[in-house]
Amino acid sequence: MTVPAEHGTTTISDRAFTRIAEKLASEDEHVTGRPHVSASVCGAVAAVHCDLAVRYPAPVPRLAAKIREHVRRRLRELTGVAVENVDIEVVELVPERRSGHRLA
């Protein structure tokens, strides 16, 4: 992908774009493990899909909206690519471990 700039162009590979999105999706404290991210970039517009494991209990709809906006905003800031769509799919809920408590 090539992004026009004032004095030339900057090229960001699809792989690099996806890796940046992956890092951004993992920045929330409720996300556990490494997210699986795929991105489709066409010119200066992109769509992103993130499969996430999140710590339970977490307000999943609110968390998804927060991560969606974070990924969209930061990708635009870092790459200059407008992200039309960020799909968040919670594929696993991981219970928080509480000290001194055992699950039966």
Image: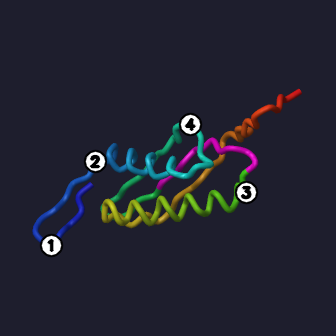
**Residue found 18% across the figure and 68% down from its top:** 5
Residues at discs 1 and 2 in contact (Cβ within 8 Å): no
The mark that comes first in sequence, 4 or 3, is 4
Residue 32, percent across and down? Answer: 59, 40
The mark that comes first in sequence, 4 or 2, is 2
The mark that comes first in sequence, 1 or 2, is 1
In the picture, residue 41 is in which quadrant?
bottom left
Q: Is residue 98 above or below residue 64?
A: above
Disc 2 residue type (three-letter): Ser
SS under mark 2 = loop
Q: Which residue is mark 3?
A: 59
Q: Which residue is mark 1?
A: 6
The answer to whether residue 11 is left or right of residue 69 is: left
* Cα distance in 3D space between marks 1 and 4: 39 Å
**Residue found 71% across the figure and 41% down from its top:** 93
Of the two numbered discs 1 and 3 in the rendering, the one whose residue sits closer to the viewer = 3
Disc 1 residue type (three-letter): Glu
Q: Residues within 10 Å of mark 2 (few under 14, many from 20)?
A: few
Q: Residues within 10 Å of mark 3 (few under 14, many from 20)?
A: few
Q: Residues within 10 Å of mark 4 (few under 14, many from 20)?
A: few
Q: Which residue is mark 4?
A: 33
Question: Which stretch appears magenta?
Answer: 48-57
Q: Which residue is mark 2?
A: 13
Of the two numbered discs 1 and 4 in the rendering, the one whose residue sits closer to the viewer = 4
Disc 4 residue type (three-letter): Gly
Q: Residues within 10 Å of mark 1 (few under 14, many from 20)?
A: few
What secondary structure predominates along the stretch shown in magenta?
Answer: strand
